[in-house]
Image (cartoon, rainbow, N blue to C red):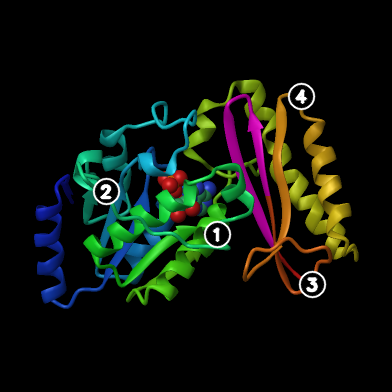
Amino acid sequence: MQVVTDIPSLKNIIEEKKQKGLRIGFVPTMGFLHEGHLSLMRTAKAENDFMVVSIFVNPLQFGAGEDYEEYPRDLERDTKMAGSTGCDLIFSPSVKEMYPPGYATFVQVERLTEGLCGASRPGHFLGVTTVVGKLFNLVCPDRAYFGQKDAQQAFVLQKMVQDLNMNLEVIVLPTVREPDGLAMSSRNKYLSPEQRQEAVVIYKSLIEAEEQIRKGEREAGIIKENIAELISKARHARLDYVEIVDSKELYSVPIIKGRCLIAVAVKFGKTRLIDNVLVEV
Ligand code: AMP
């Protein structure tokens, strides 16, 4: 496995693999890897000839006062973990390599980025689409792999690929969870033991919502209220949003019909966690 930090070296390697006709699988990450990332990598490896992982904490997708500085970083550990999945190449650029002085171009997906995390984190998705667009141009993947855990991100990136006629397939894989159900996240590391125990309420509230729907409830308002109430019982939890949206435009729906996404963001102190389930009726 090679680790490269500069764009010319990356381009040379990619060109060589492309000339050989190898199919490239790509997993973009911000590092501090966990089993959720590794599951994407294993699938990317199995479905392609050459597997590339990027590790880049992208300042552009963090708002003022968010955790860009504190975001956990450990390239040595990440290299070992990615290597264990059969990763062929890690691209781990500096901020200057990605955004040299004078950088001026941004990718903006509209509508889909307005609600959910887009509303709580203005500018976040502009940062995501810009960096992933750049990474797609550099890595030239045939397939790129993303987690359902960041459902809105996956929808937005699929839209970007479609609208900009990018020549690759976006594949979304299921959320990997801790044994108690908490979605794995690099940010779980910030939680105190008490907050960590309480954080399971996020997934429990989503499971309960699924159960309510299975039993016939269709009023989005009632389901959202129940989720909010369950979360409010956790002493350190503060609900950022609970939303039920359609799975095409991500518009809020009053009645559950067809495929819908139930998405939640909850703050434990300064730590913001997200989770979601897709339901179909
Ligand atoms: P991040 O490093 O948080 O930017 O995540 C990189 C990729 O891993 C994104 O496509 C995420 O959706 C995905 N991911 C993060 N956590 C999980 C998880 N628990 N299960 C599955 N995929 C995940």
Give the residue type at disc 2.
Gly
- Closer to the N terminus: mark 3 or mark 2? 2
In the rendered structure, the answer to whether residue 95 lies left or right of residue 164 reads left
In the rendered structure, the answer to whether residue 30 lies left or right of residue 98 reads right
Q: Which residue is mark 3?
A: 257
Residue at mark 2 to residue at mark 4: CA–CA distance: 40 Å
In the rendered structure, the answer to whether residue 61 lies left or right of residue 168 reads right
| Range shown magenta | 264-278
**x 10%, y 54%: residue:** 8
The main secondary structure of the magenta stretch is strand
Q: Counting other residues with Cα less than 10 Å from the Cα at mark 3, is it few (<14), some (14-19), or many (20 or more)? A: some
**x 48%, y 69%: residue:** 159
Residue at mark 4 to residue at mark 3: CA–CA distance: 33 Å
For label 2, being within 8 Å of ligand 1 is answered no
- Asked if residue 193 can be seen in this view, the reply is yes
Give the residue type at disc 3.
Lys
Circle 4: element type:
loop
The mark closer to the camera, 2 or 4, is 4
Q: Are marks 1 and 3 in contact (CB under 8 Å)?
A: no
Q: Which residue is mark 1?
A: 174
Residue at mark 1 to residue at mark 2: CA–CA distance: 22 Å
- Closer to the N terminus: mark 1 or mark 2? 2
- Number of marks present in the image shown: 4
**x 70%, y 44%: residue:** 241
List x then y, in percent, for residue 52: 26, 58
Residue 182 is labelled as: none
Q: Which residue is mark 4?
A: 235
Q: Which residue is mark 2?
A: 83
